Image (cartoon, grey):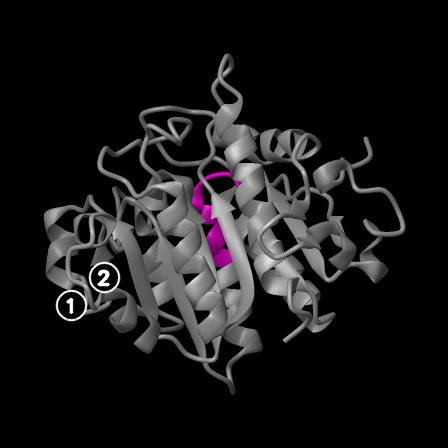
Amino acid sequence: MKQKQFGAIPEPFSALENSKAVIIPVPFEGSNSMFKGSDKGPDAVIEASAFIDLYDIFSDTEAWRAGIHTAESIRERNAEKMIKAVRTNVTQVLKKKKFPVILGGEHTVAIGAFQAFADFYKEKDLTIVQFDAHAGIRTMLGASNLNHHCVMSHAIAVAPVVQVGIRSMCAQEREIVEPGRVFYADNIRDGGNKTWMYDLLNKLTKNVFITIDLDVLDPSLMPAVATPEPGGIDWQLLIDILKKINEKSILAGVCISGLTPIKYNKAPNYVAARLVSNLITLRFNSGLK
């Protein structure tokens, strides 16, 4: 079956050769979570994207005119094979000088992207910025280091990491978290330390890869996640931070993961699709930097 295109964008704007952005769906779920179904997330986002307006009223631009190609889904069930496939596919997109948008699935799908970006920018500078409710820096959970709670330990191994919106971690993570590089939800949601945005931006390098687990958002807006945590950030704060990052650095790529669709509430699917569109708009609203 032919892959549906994000935003129902017709050719030639959805053709790979005409597209600056390439969406890579990775419907993978392998870890134990409170709610199951994150493997249905990518298809739900793409389905919802057909109903959003791709015109952005704030920048007076249309994201689809940059060209958005949706690649065939990576449907590996084995975590090691999935990570290898993501790494290969993202590398190919980067070599074509296009903007990769990895669409998960659980957050584990980001590991292959971390590796691909670290390889591609090995002689340049790269920062990985994580938006998440959970620290995700456990070295192991049970007998595996490929659990979604271990994702960011793989990022830290290949590049500097900045964590945003964190409000849950285990005692082990508290011992190894890097002070000054974690921006807790409580400190940024209601103002908190007024210098936090400056501190965050000051830690960025020229190129930034953004990984967003949708549970960074408060469950009142994004209930459709595997492990919802109260006290999350709101939509406008997330967008404001992304705008500031885009002003300071080059958005080299993004991974959006964690949507766990709810059968009778499709609003979160639409929110996730809007976030994808907004990120592509941010990257290309003033031309290719």
Q: Is 257 drawn above or below residue 161 in the view shown?
A: above
Highlighted range, magenta: 103-112
Question: Disc 1 on helix, strand or loop?
Answer: loop
In the displayed structure image, the side of residue 117 where residue 176 appears, left or right: left
Residue nearest the observer in this picture, 184 or 40: 184
Seen at 47% across and 34% down, the residue is 259
Q: In this view, does 161 lie to the left or right of 50?
A: left
Disc 2, disc 1: CB below 8 Å? yes
SS assignment for the magenta stretch, majority: helix
- Residue that appears at 35% across and 40% down: 217
Q: Quadrant of residue 252?
A: bottom right
Q: For mark 2, what is the residue?
A: 182
Give the quadrant of the C terminus: bottom right
Mark 2 belongs to which amino acid?
Val
What residue did someone put label 1 on? 179
Q: Position of residue 193 (x, y in %)?
A: 15, 61
Residue 64 spot, x, y in % from top left: 74, 50
**Residue at image location 38% in from the left, 31% down from the top:** 221
- Residue 36 has which mark? none
Q: The disc labelled 1 sits on which kind of residue?
A: Pro
Work out which residue is located at the far right of the displayed protein and give it: 12
Question: Can you name the residue that lies furthest to the top here?
Answer: 264
Between 166 and 145, the one lying in front of the other is: 166
Q: Position of residue 94 (x, y in %)?
A: 66, 69
Q: Nearer the viewer, residue 52 or 2?
A: 52
Disc 2 to disc 1, C-alpha distance: 6 Å
Q: Does the magenta stretch include residue 136?
A: no
Q: Residues within 10 Å of mark 1 (few under 14, many from 20)?
A: few
Q: Can residue 180 be seen in this view?
A: yes
- Residue 81 visible? The answer is no
